[in-house]
Image: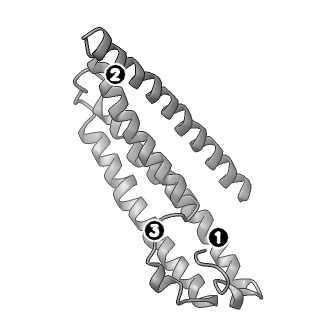
Amino acid sequence: MQAIRNAMDKGITAFCVILFMAMTIIGTYQIVTRYFFNSPSTVSEEIITYSFTWLAILAASVVFGQRGHLCMSFIYNKFTGRARVFLDIFSEILVLATALLLLLYGGMYMVQMNTTQLTASLGVSMGLMYAVLPISGVIITIYCLLNLVDMVRKLGDPNVAEYGKHQDAA
């Protein structure tokens, strides 16, 4: 299971790095055309806008996979052992429900509703731009399932009572 997580982390991170590099190149092109040639490129501006959206949402998916999202640590750190594992499981189930309902189901709805609408400069279907929502929903769902399996295994660990005693966050 760690191999699946590592492959997903590397693949999504590599895609985000490539996307960021492309945004940097396109942004530089945008600056050159705007300030040196006095002819701004609306296409490049639109590409950067949608690329940034994809980058932010996909990077957030990786953060959820690593369980690096925000938590209320003043409450979370009061729990240790089995109680902390159960709190982690509850939190992961809430993230899973959000990913399934909002990102996957809601994202598919957004894709379907905007398939015929075209972007202003690129002329590409807005459904393609919204496709990052269900894609990230699937990614977060897979990460949540992997995390849940790890947490259930922690419950069977004989050292579960030590979980959370010497760390700030799991």
Q: How many marks?
A: 3
Label 2 with label 3: CB-CB less than 8 Å? no
Q: Residues within 10 Å of mark 2 (few under 14, many from 20)?
A: some
Task: Return the disc, 3 or 1, that comes first in the chain's sequence.
Answer: 3
**Residue nearest the observer in this picture, 71 or 57:** 71
Q: Residue at x 69, y 91 (%)?
A: 161
Q: Answer yes or no: is residue 128 visible.
A: no
Q: Is residue 28 shown above or below 37?
A: below
80 to the left or right of 27:
right
Task: State the residue position of label 2.
Answer: 44
- Residue 84: x and y in percent read 57, 85
Q: Residue furthest right?
A: 158
47 to the left or right of 157:
left
Q: Residue at x 39, y 25 (%)?
A: 27
**Residue nearest the observer in this picture, 163 or 116:** 163
Q: How far is the residue under mark 3 from the one under mark 1?
A: 21 Å
The disc at residue 149 is 1
The disc at residue 70 is 3
Q: Answer yes or no: is residue 99 visible.
A: yes
Callout 3 secondary element: loop
Q: Given the image, on which type of amino acid does mark 2 rest?
A: Ser
- Which quadrant does the N terminus fall into? bottom right
- Which quadrant does the C terminus fall into? bottom right
Q: Given the image, on which type of amino acid does mark 1 rest?
A: Val
Callout 1 secondary element: helix
Given this view, does label 3 or label 1 mark the residue nearer the observer? 3
Q: Residues within 10 Å of mark 3 (few under 14, many from 20)?
A: few
